[in-house]
Image (cartoon, rainbow, N blue to C red):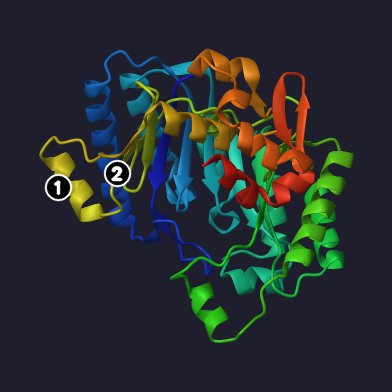
Amino acid sequence: MSSLYLHIPFCSSKCQYCDFYSGVGSAAEIAEYVELLQQNITLLKKELPQQSPLTTIFFGGGTPSLLSPQQLNALLATLRQTFGVAATAEISIEANPGTLDLARLQGYRQAGVNRLSLGIQSFDDRQLAFLGRIHSGTEARQAFAAARQAGFDNISVDLMFALPGQGLPDLERDLSALLELHSEHISLYGLTIEEETPLAARLAAGEFTPCDEDTYSDQYRLIHQRLTAAGFEHYEISNFARPGRRCAHNLAYWKRRSCLAVGCGGHSFYETGWGERWLIPSDLASYRSQLATGHNPARLLEDFDRQTAMKEYAYLALRTADGLARDDFAQRFSCLPEEVFSAALNSCQPYLLNQDGAWRFDLAGWLIYDHLISHFL
């Protein structure tokens, strides 16, 4: 597998909860940025001449659906001319329902995008306003219907839970609306209040009360129950898929496979040695100047040794339903998980399943994943 991520750091407006590198950009700024991405792709290919054709491509952000179909097509054309793109490649774009119409979606589909990740977040207009989203529940449904009309048969929907004032009946309504869409994939995220976001400032000012742990747990269990009963596979802490519809690009991350990145704020991972992680700094002026002088804007963030590689491998694998597979671990590191993580596995026993040659967290374990995984780190 060969994967590439393109970071598009522009939005129509900044959501209240978002701490990703993004900001409001003009049409001229977005057009210039597309040219910078093309330069970045060409430069990266020169440094990696043996890189095989891409099997997954992911446009993330930010709001990648601010790109016109022509701009997206130009970027895909550059990728085809440099790295090459496999005929069966999964090509995904994140999209805000408030930026979409049928013509734009048809243009994306004609350009070669075959997977749409739709950031609905909620069908409750009051919650959407609280989150700072630019669309309504009705517009979210219309965007999904337009995507189907445009020919998308692989659509993922993002939904948030653990929202302030959201009770189980409210979540039930959101889940029912979600299931009526019959999407192929669903990502569910509990609201997190990140530092230095507008939402954090509002919390400090006492404008709302965050969700408590018991409510979070009840909502997470309800989500699991409703979606698995509807035929979805809960294949990662926050992700559900119809059979055969797991996100191949994200699986590359969770399986610790190489994934290239271009764009300001992008992270690359290379399987070289025990692994290297590179970061393109979140500084558009620096990004522009580095590319103008023919320099790779990426900087080495972490160079793994065997011990840190094993820890990260376990950390990522235990996020997934496939779990920490003994044979895969042994093939990579020439030892077994229980030889390296004996104390950690014992500490997590009440929440661990050891089946079919793999260690997995149960649902209760996923609920306290951050606590349990600390034993491995």
User: Residue 325 at x, y = what percent?
Assistant: 65, 22
In the rendering, which numbered label is found on residue 361? none
Q: Secondary structure at mark 2?
A: loop
Among numbered discs 2 and 1, the one appearing first in the sequence: 2
Query: From the viewer's perspective, is residue 99 above or below residue 296?
Result: below
User: Which residue was labeled with disc 2?
Assistant: 280
User: Residue 332 at x, y = what percent?
Assistant: 50, 17
What type is the residue that disc 2 sits on? Ile
Residue found 62% across the figure and 31% down from its top: 342
In the rendering, which numbered label is found on residue 289? 1
Q: Secondary structure at mark 1?
A: helix
What type is the residue that disc 1 sits on? Ser
The image quadrant that residue 324 belongs to is top right
Query: From the viewer's perspective, is residue 172 above or below residue 239?
Result: below
Residue found 74% across the figure and 67% down from its top: 124
The image quadrant that residue 136 belongs to is bottom right
Q: Is residue 300 left or right of residue 177?
A: left
User: Residue 40 at x, y = what percent?
Assistant: 26, 35
Residue found 80% across the figure and 62% down from its top: 171
Q: Is residue 26 left or right of residue 291?
A: right
Query: From the viewer's perspective, is residue 118 above or below residue 210?
Result: above
User: Residue 36 at x, y = what percent?
Assistant: 25, 42
Residue found 70% across the figure and 41% down from its top: 348
